[in-house]
Image (tube, rainbow, N blue to C red):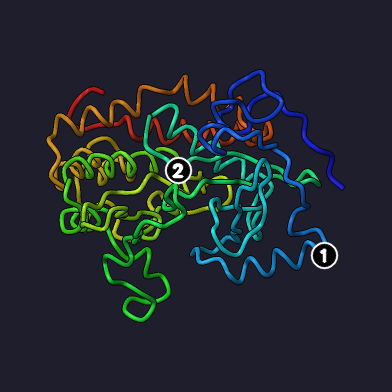
């Protein structure tokens, strides 16, 4: 049995000096309740009566994705598995990946960097541990309102009307980010503001090697029902390069169709500053705005390193994570048009 972890930073915000969740994390994640970072049940891998509850929960939860996910609700100060009225999504360690034990800490760190360093709207999240010491990632559902009712949420695969029947088994990857921006024009009223947020997510996913930012990992949400829809907070942000040898961008058509003929990509053999600047212009952003946003992502290396060192990744993975980021940072800094 794994020993329970010794905590020296908040497993939510990564703020130093806490042996469990900080007051700030409890307020954001758990309505201020004194929830422990240790669940009162063991991990799904543990055999026993609890295993049956995991199996039942898994068959009932209506959340898509390959990784196993479970639904939790908050009862007082305790998080419990539930088959209805779920308020949280629990993601244990998955299977069939390199360094699989580091997946929860990887996703937690990447989401915290997006929120804390770059101030991107993200789903509230934390790291949590089963009572056998095994870590998991937990995120608060943003589509559940205070009264328990749900907002209408549609991912971009649904908006694009692509399925396994129409496009094949890789349907959620057979697209371009430019085409996704056109979906924003069609389905979200505040298109320009939304496309700026979307643009930042595309740059972030490149910089932090999230090779799984596909159509189903972006969603439109309407909580009022009058068509006043918006792009959801970011979710499922993770450095996939730590675990699989994947491509720089998730979508097979890349930033925009035929982008491999663009001068910058042709010169360097990878996406760089000019490629993203061109992408911003093609989706309707002002060039100066797009440029400032890219430069903003290049200006936070010290903060990224500090948060990485405070994370729950092991020391070897911390080094790998930061080296992958640093390589992408060098790529994004290159430009044929100007000195960055």
**Residue sitting at x 63%, y 28%:** 10
Would residue 109 be found to the left or right of residue 75 on screen? left
Mark 2 and mark 1: Cα distance apart in space: 32 Å
Expressed as whole percent of the image width and height from the top left, the position of residue 158 reads: 32, 67
Q: Is residue 249 visible?
A: yes
| Quarter of the figure with the C terminus | top left
Comparing 305 with 224, the one in front is: 224
Would residue 106 be found to the left or right of residue 332 on screen? right
Pointer 1 local density, CA inside 10 Å: few below 14, some 14–19, many at least 20? few
**Residue sitting at x 57%, y 45%:** 242
Q: Identify the element where label 1 is drawn.
A: helix
Q: Identify the element where label 2 is drawn.
A: loop
**Residue sitting at x 46%, y 45%:** 237
Comparing 279 with 180, the one in front is: 180
In the picture of the structure, the residue carrying the numbered disc 1 is 49
**Residue sitting at x 81%, y 47%:** 132
Expressed as whole percent of the image width and height from the top left, the position of residue 328 reads: 41, 36
Residue that protrudes farthest toward the right in the picture = 1
In the picture of the structure, the residue carrying the numbered disc 2 is 123
Is residue 57 positioned above or below 188 on the image?
A: below
Comparing 260 with 149, the one in front is: 149
Expressed as whole percent of the image width and height from the top left, the position of residue 169 reads: 42, 74
Q: Is residue 259 visible?
A: no
In the rendered structure, which disc, 2 or 1, sits on the residue that comes first in sequence?
Answer: 1
Q: Quadrant of residue 268?
A: top left
Q: How many marks?
A: 2
Is residue 215 positioned above or below 277 on the image?
A: below
Would residue 173 be found to the left or right of residue 194 on screen? right
Comparing 126 with 314, the one in front is: 126
Expressed as whole percent of the image width and height from the top left, the position of residue 211 reads: 44, 51
Pointer 2 local density, CA inside 10 Å: few below 14, some 14–19, many at least 20? many
Q: Nearer the viewer, mark 2 or mark 1?
A: 1
């Amino acid at each position: 049995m794994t020993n329970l972890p010794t905590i020296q930073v908040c497993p939510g915000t990564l703020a130093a000096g806490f042996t469990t969740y900080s007051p700030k994390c409890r307020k954001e994640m758990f309505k201020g309740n004194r929830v422990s970072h240790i669940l009162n049940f063991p991990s799904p891998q543990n055999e026993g009566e609890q295993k049956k509850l995991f199996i039942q929960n898994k068959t009932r939860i209506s959340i898509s994705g390959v990784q196993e996910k479970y639904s939790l609700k908050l009862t007082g100060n305790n998080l419990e598995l539930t088959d209805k009225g779920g308020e949280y999504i629990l993601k244990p360690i998955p299977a069939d990946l390199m360094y699989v034990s580091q997946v929860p800490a990887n996703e937690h760190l990447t989401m915290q960097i997006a929120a804390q360093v770059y101030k991107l709207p993200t789903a509230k999240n934390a790291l949590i541990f089963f009572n056998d010491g095994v870590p998991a990632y937990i995120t608060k559902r943003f589509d559940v309102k205070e009264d328990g009712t749900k907002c209408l949420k549609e991912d971009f695969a649904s908006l694009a009307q692509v399925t396994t029947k129409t496009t094949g088994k890789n349907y959620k990857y057979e697209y371009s980010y430019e085409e996704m921006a056109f979906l924003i024009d069609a389905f979200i009223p505040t298109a320009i503001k939304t496309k700026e947020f979307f643009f930042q997510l595309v740059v972030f996913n490149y910089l932090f090697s999230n090779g799984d930012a596909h159509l189903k990992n972006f969603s439109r949400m309407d909580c009022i029902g009058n068509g006043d829809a918006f792009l959801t907070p970011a979710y499922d942000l993770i450095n996939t390069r730590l675990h699989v040898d994947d491509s720089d961008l998730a979508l097979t058509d890349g930033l925009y169709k035929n982008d491999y003929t663009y001068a910058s990509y042709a010169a360097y053999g990878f996406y760089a500053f000019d490629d993203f600047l061109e992408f911003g212009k093609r989706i309707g952003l002002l060039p100066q705005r797009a440029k400032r946003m890219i430069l903003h992502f290049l200006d936070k290396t010290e903060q990224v390193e500090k948060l990485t060192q405070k994370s729950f990744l092991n020391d070897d993975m911390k080094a790998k994570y930061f080296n992958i980021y640093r390589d992408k940072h060098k790529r994004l800094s290159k430009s044929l048009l100007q000195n960055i």
